[in-house]
Amino acid sequence: MINVIISWIIFGFSVSTGIFVFYKNPKSVVHGFFAIMAILLGIWSVSRLFLNVLAITPLQVFNGVLIGFVARLLLKFKVSYVKIVSEDNLKTPLTYDLKRGYSYLLMGKDTEKILQIFTDLVTHGIQGLYISREEPEEIRKKYKLGKIRIFWLSRKAIYPYSLSPNDLRSITYLLKEFFTSADDGVVGIDGIEYLIVYNSLPSVIKWIDEINEIVIEKKARLLLNINPYLIEERDISFLKIHIRNLQEI
C-alpha cells in the first residue's frame, strides 16, 4: 500500500513539475527536454503498479517503448547541445595544414599530439567537435577550448555531453549531424581502443569506415588517436588497409 501511495505522489509531483518547467520557458530546448523527462518519469512510476500476470505483456511493451523514446530524446538533446563553431580565427599560418576530405591516424599513448593538432585547426577558423576518454573540463582548461563542444566517452558519466562506448549508432548520428551542418569541420576522437573493448574490431572498423565516407563526402577532417600499447599491431594494420583516404601522421 505504501508503494502505491509513493508511486502516485511521484506521478503527481513529476507531472506538475514538468508542466511548470515547460510553461516557464516554452521556447527553451533545455526546459522542454527536462519537462518531458519529468512527465515521463511520472507516467513510468504509476505504470509499474499495473504490472501483474494478466497484463504484463502490454505494459512491458509500453515500458520498452517509453525507454526507447527517452533514449531518442536524450540523443536529440545532445545533438541540440552541439554548436557549429570554431574556437578562434587566427590569421597566423596553420602549424598542421591538413587536407580536407581525409581521415588522419595518430599513434600515441596519450592525447597530447591529437589535441595539439585539433586545437591548431579550431583556432584558425575550422569548426570542431571532440570526443574523448578524458574529462572534458580538464581538456578545456589545458587547451583553452571554451567554445568547442567536447563529449566524454564514458559508460558512467552523468554529464549531458557523455557518450556510451557501446552505442556506435548514436555517435554516428551525432557526427553526421555535425559534418552536415559544418562548412569546414574537424572531429577529433581519442580512445579508439576503448571502443574496440566494448564492441569488436570489425564493428569499430566498419563504424570508422562509415564516418570516413561522410568525411570524404563533406570534405571535412577526422582525427583518430590509438594507443599502440593497448592494441595489437596486426589490428592496426587491418584498420589501415580497410579505411579509404586514411593517412598516418
Image: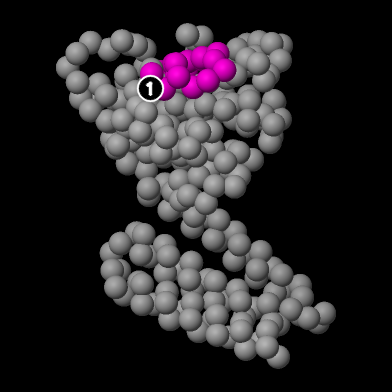
Quarter of the figure with the N terminus: bottom right
As displayed, is residue 10 above or below residue 107? below
As displayed, is residue 102 above or below residue 198? above
Q: Residue at x 41, y 22 (%)?
A: 115
Nearer the observer, 137 or 16: 137
Q: Is 108 inside the magenta-drawn segment?
A: yes
| Range shown magenta | 101-116
For label 1, the crowd category at 10 Å Cα-Cα, with few meaning under 14, some 14 to 19 and many 20 or more, is many
Label 1 belongs to which residue? Answer: 118
Could you say where residue 240 lies in the image, as x and y percent from the top left? Answer: 60, 12
As displayed, is residue 58 above or below residue 165? below
Q: For this view, does 48 lie left or right of residue 220?
A: right
Could you say where residue 6 lies in the image, as x and y percent from the top left? Answer: 61, 84
Q: Residue at x 49, y 74 (%)?
A: 39
Q: For this view, does 231 lie left or right of residue 111?
A: right
Q: Residue at x 44, y 37 (%)?
A: 136
Q: For this view, does 100 lie left or right of residue 237?
A: left
Could you say where residue 9 lies in the image, as x and y percent from the top left? Answer: 55, 85
**Please, what secondary structure does the residue beneath circle 1 have?**
helix
Could you say where residue 134 lies in the image, as x and y percent from the top left? Answer: 50, 33
- Which amino acid lies under the numbered mark 1 shown in the image of this protein? Phe
Residue furthest left as drawn:
91
Residue 83 in which image quadrant? top left
As displayed, is residue 60 above or below residue 208? below
